[in-house]
Amino acid sequence: MVDVVLELYDLKMELGMTPNRRVYNLLIQSLCQEGKVNEVLRVLKECMNCGYFPGNQTFTLLSFALLRMGKLKQLRSLLEEAKSRKFRSIIPIHARYVSALCKNGAVNEAYLELLNAGVGAGVMMYGSAYCNLIRAFIELGMVEFPPVLLIQMQELGFKPGRRLYREVVGSLCDMEMFDMVLVLLNKQLEIKKLDIQTCYNYVIYGAAHSKKPEMAMEVYSRMVNAGIEANIETDILILRCYVKSRRFGDAFSFFRCLIAKRTPVNKLYNVFICGFCEAGKVEHAIEL
């Protein structure tokens, strides 16, 4: 049916008769639903040449269709035009566009889009775009950028999850960029977007996951020296880090310090016992 409608449209254009806005919207929607990418782009161009621009519903449908078809260059042009017309619908689409760039490996382009998409440009990015870009940089080994984006997304009102924080800190630890870990920690404490205990725990969690006990203990010591009492979660993170790194002597020393200063907690014993079992040190697990 859409082919018949398209023929009628072409005939009307040949006769010099310009369709109205409603005709363009309905035709573009129908072509999008049929996945006729070339026809969609042709009609869109003719629509804009006639001074029309898709309505909100058509714009959204068209944008998602271009995303599915992988026509990112055409989507970029559409977004630029929509931005100049102050389209509200651009906000979620632009975030998905940045995510699509990341998935296609165009990380530098995605980064520039993100930098240009602040309030001054009329677009507020969604947190998902930041998450995707951060992970894309990590996959490419460009680990100097994720900490900057991690702070930036919080300043725009988006809260990073524990897993994302772990990935950023872990990537820095894997590259042995420990100074940058501490810079990230200090910046995180400075912007006050997370409570202090969570700041330290997130960084310790990332270092522990990368099996970098020295880095984890450095952050732990800074926390204690700052007058912040470690909670049970922090203790477990450090203990698990030692065990997974097969630093059993250090693990025992840390464990003895813990049970000397606090009432023994089942969780601490469980972490220790499970860790030794996983490491094949059943004899130590039995002792506990």
Image (cartoon, helix red, strand yellow):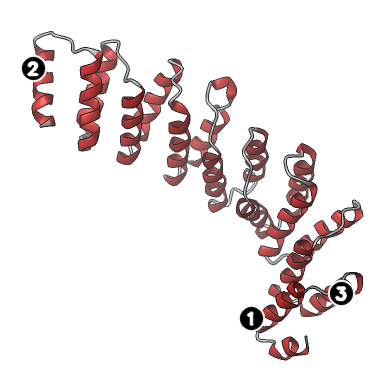
Viewer-nearest residue: 76 or 28: 28
Does the residue at mark 1 contact the one at mark 2 (Cβ under 8 Å)? Answer: no
State the residue position of label 2: 11
Q: Quadrant of the C terminus?
A: bottom right
In this picture, is 50 found above or below 247? above
The disc, 1 or 2, on the residue closer to the chain's N-terminal end is: 2
Secondary structure, mark 3, is: helix
Q: Amino acid at mark 1?
A: Glu
Image spot of residue 221 (x, y percent):
86, 59
* Residue extending furthest toward the top: 16
Q: Which mark is residue 260?
A: none
Does any portion of residue 177 appear in the rendered image?
Answer: no
Q: Tell me if mark 1 has few (under 14), some (14-19) or many (20+) residues whose alpha carbon lies within 10 angstroms of its own.
A: few
Q: Amino acid at mark 3?
A: Ile
Q: CA distance from mark 1 to mark 2?
A: 74 Å
Q: CA distance from mark 3 to mark 1?
A: 22 Å
Residue at image position (37%, 24%) is 78
Q: Is residue 125 left or right of residue 104?
A: right
State the residue position of label 3: 259
Q: Quadrant of the N terminus?
A: top left
Q: Tell me if mark 2 has few (under 14), some (14-19) or many (20+) residues whose alpha carbon lies within 10 angstroms of its own.
A: few
Q: Tell me if mark 3 has few (under 14), some (14-19) or many (20+) residues whose alpha carbon lies within 10 angstroms of its own.
A: few
In this picture, is 231 found above or below 276? above
Q: Amino acid at mark 2?
A: Leu
Q: Which mark is residue 278?
A: 1
Image spot of residue 215 (x, y percent):
77, 60
Image spot of residue 137 (x, y percent):
56, 47
